[in-house]
């Protein structure tokens, strides 16, 4: 079963191995967040679990994805580091709430 992890700014979301099964994004409806997730416990470097993606804030709802089952989930080894930027890069001036669905590995 996936456990929710909430993120509201750039930074470390979780340390250790696991699987990313879903991500949902809520915004203030004004600014499009550009989000990247790396398999790293310290910085925005290494393997991208979620390549840089811009989400439409004007949808005024939840953006995101659900992978469906444990077989489809994206493995990560070191942790999840989330980068939230403005569309096109730079500081994000809006409000964003990201909920990650994470399945911890048995060894974690």
Image (tube, rainbow, N blue to C red):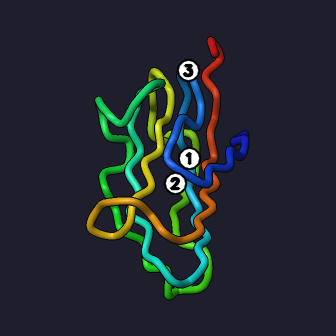
Label 3: which secondary element:
loop
Which residue has dot 3 on it?
16
The label nearer to you, 3 versus 2, is: 3
Residue drawn 63% across the image and 35% down it:
103
Specify the label residue 21 is tagged with: 1
| CA distance for labels 3 and 2 | 20 Å
Answer with the quarter of the image where residue 15 lies.
top right
- In this picture, is 61 found above or below 102? below
- Label 1, secondary structure: give it: strand
Residue 67 shows which numbered tag? 2
Label located before the other in sequence (3 or 2): 3
Q: Real-space Cα distance between discs 1 and 3?
A: 15 Å
* Circles 3 and 2 in contact, beta carbons < 8 Å: no
Front label number (1 vs 3): 3
Residue 78 is marked as none
Residue 52 in the figure: left or right of residue 102: left
């Amino acid at each position: 079963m996936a456990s929710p992890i909430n993120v509201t700014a750039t930074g470390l979301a979780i340390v250790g191995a696991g699987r990313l099964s879903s991500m949902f994004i809520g915004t203030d409806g004004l600014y499009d967040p550009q989000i990247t997730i790396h398999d790293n416990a310290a910085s925005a470097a290494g393997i991208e679990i979620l390549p840089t993606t811009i989400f439409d804030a004007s949808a005024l709802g939840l953006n995101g994805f659900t992978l469906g089952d444990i077989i489809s989930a994206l493995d990560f080894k070191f942790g999840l580091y989330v980068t939230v930027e403005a569309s096109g890069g730079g500081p994000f001036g809006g409000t964003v709430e990201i909920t990650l669905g994470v399945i911890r590995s048995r060894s974690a």
